Amino acid sequence: MSWSDKPPHELEYDVLLNNCKWQRPMGCEFHDLVNGHKTYEVNLPQVAWVGASHGWLAAADNLSNLLLYNPFTFTTIPLPPITDLGCVEAVYDSEGSIVRYRLGKHKESDAKFLGVWFYQKLVLSCAPSLGGDYVAMIIHSSANRVSFASAIEGRWRLASTITQGICDRYADCGYHKGRFYTLTMYGVLEMLDLDNPCEPRKEIFFTERNTENPLVFLRFLVSTPWGDLLQIKFSRRVHRTKRLELRLCKIEVENNRLVRLRSAVAAAALREHAIFVGQNHSVCLPIRDFPELRSSCVYFTTPCLCNDDHFPSRREGWKGVGIYDLQNQIFEDVFPSCERGYSTYLPISEVWITPSPGL
């Protein structure tokens, strides 16, 4: 079931193009990690890409409404309109067309450009191509809010917010064992129960601010095939030659505990798998099925969700696409990266995507 009047297989590629007339198509490359790093040239609309989840790309159209796009089948699924979100109000012209959006009392944005910076990340509970109900969750509003929509209900609902006056913001969200989880830049973990028809129930873990390393600029949640929930934390090193550090931790929700896994233990904990993090929902893939991948490594791209105050520049060792070897604690480049600068207010340039089942 989709949010559209038509089933997904009847929605053609030109739907996405028609919704995005204000942008020209752009050339992109798909790097194949299964077949010897083959590269495929594809043309995609130049829109505000929000990320990828379960084989689908997420983008904002010319009215800043979100849609899902499958780059392998060209299927497009519109998501509920942005005006469902309580923090966004449409402003109409004399002909009844939406021209701007009002955010609060004193801030407005052009309708077609709001989507460039308003959404930070989207994840799905499962692939829409599997049929049935599924849930989309978004981090939005400068990473201060989390909202969700189910395919059956067909509207956005607020799930959680960061309290005003607190400098914290959401760093990632993910789906694990039938529940959505959010993680903030300070390391606060929230478990969201969305089954309540009136209001989502939220359980909070690790409520104290992280003081161990104030230079954290990225955090990710990873749900493993064997049932563990992991946290990956990128931070600056101080007074060392290598400026970047990655820490892998196991989240024990039942015990409200975060267990740091040091290098050798962390490598073994991945059980011959590789992790992919970035603007996509985090993926953990077995090496035996993907011989081009390296075991016990974290593949990463630069996401929009980062702590700009401590975000390292390329001169300090950060690249757009790279690998962190947990065993040797070394960063390496993977592909040539887009040369433009990264910013919270720009669309993504690189994202990991895996074809959804049945394609």
Image (tube, rainbow, N blue to C red):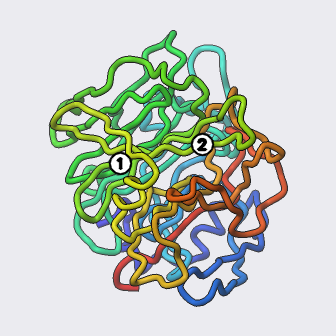
The answer to which of 75 and 40 lies nearer the viewer is 40
Label drawn at residue 245: 2
Label drawn at residue 244: none
- Indicate the amino acid at tag 2: Glu
Q: Is residue 58 visible?
A: no
Residue at coordinates 65% horizontally, 77% vertically from top-left?
30
- Indicate the amino acid at tag 1: Leu
Which secondary structure lies at badge 2? strand
In front: label 2 or label 1: 2
Left or right relative to 105: residue 172: left
Q: Quadrant of the N terminus?
A: bottom left
| Vertical comparison of 40 with 104: above or below | below
Q: What is the x, y in percent for residue 56?
A: 48, 67
The residue sitting at the top extreme is 165
What is the distance, in whole Å, between disc 2 and disc 1 at their CAs? Answer: 16 Å
Q: What is the x, y in percent for residue 16?
A: 60, 67
Label drawn at residue 230: 1
